[in-house]
Image (tube, rainbow, N blue to C red):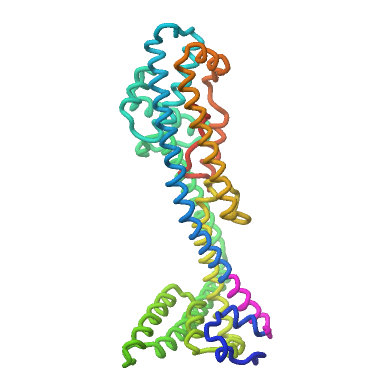
């Protein structure tokens, strides 16, 4: 195989592997695969770098914009809780409440307490909840866990071990999800064992032979990677350099070489070879079929690793906005959702401030309560839907359940 361009390093010693390959026409399917994999790896790396840069901006917005709003909302909710507590305990002159109005205020109080106390310990508010519910915080959480245990048994037929260690219902649901996933994995593993047991002697022999071939191929692939590393080390070893400046340069390059080799990053190693002019376009276009096959396998594994890293990095953003998959998700979309969340939060803070004023005026208080509909005490179907989603394999473990809007 011959290159159509020759060496590119006389004009542009800083060319990347992608740029070098783009100036040669692939002469075989394996060469086309090599070029495609190199390009895909570069694109995925660029995407990962873009998401990493966006994550810094996203976290700054959370700190600078979101957290102050959350603090204001929590402070307002706490003020509202104490105000409602006072209205129920000591209505005051002109604020006498009817039975239905007291029931509505009690329900608002319960929702606010659940929302605020979910965010952290507050002894004053816990005393308010205990006073109005007649149940201590510890007893309340224990009752929630007992209800969750009963639901898991009655709805899903799942017996939860007594020493699950969960302190809240959400933790118990997450524990149950892990247990279900372990059961599924055990069943899958047992099924695999059963299938293996049914294999004939000939099938087992073929499987062993295939495994041996895979191990030999892996050994040869590793040898190809070691050869690239060895050539770079031979050219860059700083101990052989007398000039201090050149020794420092080669030391820095050697660090990059070793990092790339430890990560099995073939593309980085080839890029370093191009950088020091150890290889050129002609070398890349004249790789032997066996070496090319080894390189392609290494690059496939490298691409799989980068895609997995990209998935792990983007997943929190997907979960934050309920995006079904990474495909199509961009930082601009995440930013739009964050801006919308901030707008809703600002609206909630504004509405809460309006209600705080209204609740201190008997006439306006009654007007607000007149438009508030009491909720039934039976199970919210949304909660059951959320629970089913949580318990499904691959469900949203660790994510908070959606709460009713309460102000």
In this orientation, which residue lies closer to the viewer: 265 or 199? 265
In this orientation, which residue lies closer to the viewer: 30 or 405? 405
In this orientation, which residue lies closer to the viewer: 77 or 28? 77
Residue 382, how many percent across, how many down?
57, 31
Residue 23, how many percent across, how many down?
65, 84
Quadrant housing the N terminus: bottom right
Residue 217, how many percent across, how many down?
52, 79
In this orientation, which residue lies closer to the viewer: 144 or 187? 144
- Classify residue 165 as left or right of residue 316: left
Residue 145 visible, this orientation: no
Q: Residue at x 67, y 90 (%)?
A: 4
Q: Check if residue 33 falls in the magenta segment.
A: yes
Q: Residue at x 63, y 55 (%)?
A: 328
Up/down of 349 relative to 334, above or below: above
- Classify residue 51 as left or right of residue 71: right
Q: Residue at x 52, y 77 (%)?
A: 267
Q: Which residues, given as a range, are shown in magenta?
A: 25-40
Residue 24, how many percent across, how many down?
65, 85
Q: Quadrant of residue 96?
A: top left
Up/down of 72 relative to 189, above or below: above
Magenta stretch: dominant SS?
Answer: helix
Q: Check if residue 201 falls in the magenta segment.
A: no
Q: Quadrant of residue 128?
A: top left
Q: Residue at x 43, y 86 (%)?
A: 232
Question: Total label count?
Answer: 0
Residue 221 visible, this orientation: yes
Up/down of 65 relative to 356, above or below: below
């Amino acid at each position: 195989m011959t290159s159509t361009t020759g060496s590119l390093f006389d004009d542009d010693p800083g060319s990347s592997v992608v740029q070098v390959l783009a100036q040669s026409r692939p002469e075989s399917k394996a060469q086309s695969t090599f070029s495609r994999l190199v390009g895909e790896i570069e694109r995925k790396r660029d995407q990962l770098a873009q998401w990493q840069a966006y994550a810094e901006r996203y976290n700054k917005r959370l700190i600078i914009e979101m957290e102050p709003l959350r603090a204001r909302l929590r402070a307002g909710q706490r003020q509202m809780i104490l105000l409602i507590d006072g209205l129920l305990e000591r209505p005051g002159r002109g604020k006498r409440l009817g039975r239905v109005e007291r029931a509505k205020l009690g329900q608002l109080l319960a929702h606010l307490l659940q929302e605020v106390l979910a965010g952290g310990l507050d002894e004053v508010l816990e005393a308010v909840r205990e006073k109005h519910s007649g149940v201590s915080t510890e007893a309340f959480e224990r009752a929630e866990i007992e209800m969750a245990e009963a639901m898991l048994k009655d709805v899903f037929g799942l017996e939860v071990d007594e020493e699950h260690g969960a302190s809240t219902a959400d933790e118990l649901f997450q524990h149950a999800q892990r247990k279900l996933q372990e059961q599924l994995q055990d069943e899958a593993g047992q099924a695999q064992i059963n299938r293996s047991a049914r294999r004939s002697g000939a099938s087992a022999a073929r499987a062993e032979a295939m495994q041996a071939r895979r191990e030999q191929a892996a050994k040869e692939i590793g040898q190809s990677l070691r050869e690239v590393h060895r050539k770079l080390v031979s050219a860059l070893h700083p101990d052989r350099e007398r000039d201090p400046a050149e020794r420092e340069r080669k030391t820095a390059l050697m660090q990059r070489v070793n990092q790339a080799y430890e990560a099995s990053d073939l593309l980085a190693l080839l890029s370093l070879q191009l950088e020091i002019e150890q290889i050129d376009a002609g070398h890349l276009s004249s790789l032997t079929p066996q070496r090319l096959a080894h390189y392609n396998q290494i690059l496939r594994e490298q691409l799989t690793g980068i895609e997995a890293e990209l998935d792990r990095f983007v997943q929190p953003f997907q979960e934050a906005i309920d995006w079904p998959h990474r495909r199509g998700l961009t930082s601009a979309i995440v930013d739009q959702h964050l801006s919308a969340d901030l707008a809703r939060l600002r609206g909630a803070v504004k509405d809460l401030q309006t209600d705080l004023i209204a609740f201190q005026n008997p006439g306006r208080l009654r007007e607000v309560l007149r438009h508030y509909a009491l909720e039934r005490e039976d199970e919210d179907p949304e909660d059951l839907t959320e629970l089913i989603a949580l318990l499904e394999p691959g469900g949203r473990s660790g994510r908070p359940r959606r709460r009713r809007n309460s102000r």
